[in-house]
Amino acid sequence: MRQPHFLFCVLILIGSGCTRTVDNDSIRREVGDFLKLYNSIYQGTTAITGDAQWFSMTEVNEAHTGQRTGAGKVYAAFSGNREIIERTRRYLAQKDKLDESSARQLEKIFLIAAQNPGTIPEIVNLKVEAEAQQSAAMDGFQFKLSGKPTTANEIDKILEKSRNLEERRKVWEASKEIGKGLKPGLVKLQPFRNKVAKEMGYSSYFALQVADYGMSASEMMQFLNQLVEETRPFYQQLHCWVRNELAKRYHQRVPKRIPAHWLGNRWSQEWPGIVEGVDLDSLFIGKDSQWIVRQAESFYTSLGMPPLPESFWKKSDLYPLPAASTRKKNAHASAWHIDLQNDVRSLMSVEPNFYWFSTAHHELGHAYYFMAYSNPEVPFVLREGANRAFHEAIGDLIAIATGQVPYLQQIGLLPGEKKIDRTQWLLDEALRTLVFIPWSAGVMSHWEYDLYEQNLPESEYNTRWWKYVGEFQGVEPPTPRSETYCDPATKTHINDDAAQYYDYAMAFAIKYQLHNHIAKNILKQDPNYCNYYNNKEVGKFLMDILKLGATRDWRQVLREKTGEDISSKALLEYFKPVLGFLQKQNAGREAGWD
């Protein structure tokens, strides 16, 4: 760590001795020198921090948690340095004298500094320590069924396949036990996160994270509410059909709200395994986990993109731990850009089923985004997606492509002569996709808005959570959930990627806009029945977006590439063919749940 620390000291010295020039040429030179030095140190400290975080999540132990904490403090001390904040503010006050790239870098630097402002170093250190401890507590948790250790993958399999309601209830409840231990850490973190945000002029930590989109907290909530309302009529039709189908499956009365343990996902964010006759997992019989990841890479190389670097295969952690392993790792799939250059990795637990087939394509989408904008035209501080949602949208866009019948047929997973009921196929996709909107734009985003912007008291964490689950998703817990539990904390993003879950809601709108454009304007195919595989023109379209990083305003990029502003129009259009089926099935039934 000596070299970054030395450069950090150099930066302070240069900052202390700088002259406060005002003419255009001088300010441009001064800003250019500042940005060159900042980017160099930023890249180095990011690499150190990323490596420490990686090991803290792939091999959870006290030593790695300590290393993550130490690296986090070094990163915070640099990125939130008081001199950096003051100089960035002064330069931004003269933004009209600067080129667009310099201005965008300064804006990003200010937002980075706002995460760890050096004006309150005690609070920043406490936040870094608390975040590392919370992550370690989450990653080190051991799920148990009937007193025996189990894995998140095993829990998910039972929830997707079991027809025994008592077994499902026990498994669902076991999946929520982690929340009890995480609640104290979340209570501790909330004021630290809010204090750093308010120190930099933001109303809350939620508002600080939203600022990366060039939006206020209220503007983001307005967009999310609009997204929920526009998709709600379709969601109500899906909800009505599903609760009737599941009532028949489990031989129960048709409920108003769907009991959470009836659904095949721990958070009801997607509803797999309900459509009879669409068994996507059966396509992978005879395949192994390695084939899944290699095929995902093959998808991208077929578009003209380069192979993943050899270091990806050596350094990634892609497969489940052996049953006898004493090592513990984070169970959530993720992609990592350790050094903002060539060191790209992924953390997964891949098994041969459709979920992991789709997820592997998604996570490699992040990796290819990393690789594309790691070019000399993009400064280190702008090596991000056009916005955070764009990163998720690209991965999810490819996930859409993985479920297209022609692609599955071309790579030999789906027999070409097999008759496909396209309505049922699309219905299954809607239950894995469209139902995500009330979860992401509704439950998650509204709860975190309340947590940070409204200072939600800890005595109401679980009560408010289930209020939103009921209102937005039409789902209820199998039995009452007291404040002993903290069911929101069972979602990793609440702990590790706080106040950012609306990224996924926005990504869902963006990805269908991109898919609609690719299918209609490049492939000249039906968006519900198309194939990206081996199409270099599709690859060029995507690379033209990916290689920009965050050098352009995301609104401009979306408008230029699709001709539209962000909306739910393309998403609803994509699923329209299944709406008539649902309305016919639901005739005479009440579609709402309140």
Image (cartoon, rainbow, N blue to C red):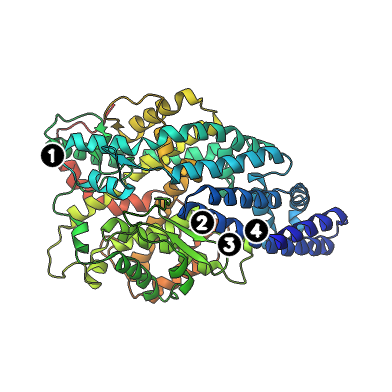
The three-letter code of the residue at mark 3 reads: Arg
Rendered view: 322 above or below 86: below
Tag 3 secondary structure:
loop
The residue to which callout 4 is attached is 45
Q: CA distance from mark 2 to mark 3?
A: 19 Å
- Left or right of 424, for residue 528: right
**Circles 4, 2 touching at the beta carbon (< 8 Å):** no
Give the class, few, some or many, for how many residues have Cα within 10 Å of label 1's Cα (few <14, many ≥20). Answer: few
Residue 301 horizontal/vertical position (percent): 39, 75
The three-letter code of the residue at mark 2 reads: Trp
Residue 90 horizontal/vertical position (percent): 78, 50
- Left or right of 511, for residue 210: right
Q: Nearer the viewer, mark 2 or mark 1?
A: 2
Q: Along the polypeptide, which appears first: circle 4 or circle 1?
A: 4
Give the class, few, some or many, for how many residues have Cα within 10 Å of label 3's Cα (few <14, many ≥20). Answer: many
The residue to which callout 3 is attached is 383
Q: Along the polypeptide, which appears first: circle 3 or circle 1?
A: 1
The residue to which callout 2 is attached is 54
Q: CA distance from mark 4 to mark 1?
A: 54 Å
Q: Nearer the viewer, mark 4 or mark 1?
A: 4
Q: Along the polypeptide, which appears first: circle 4 or circle 2?
A: 4
Q: Along the polypeptide, which appears first: circle 2 or circle 1?
A: 2
The residue to which callout 1 is attached is 249
Residue at 15 percent across and 61 percent down: it is 420
Give the class, few, some or many, for how many residues have Cα within 10 Å of label 2's Cα (few <14, many ≥20). Answer: many
Tag 1 secondary structure:
helix
Residue at 55 percent across and 67 percent down: it is 373
Q: CA distance from mark 3 to mark 1?
A: 49 Å
Q: Nearer the viewer, mark 2 or mark 3?
A: 2
The three-letter code of the residue at mark 1 reads: Arg
Q: Nearer the viewer, mark 3 or mark 4?
A: 4
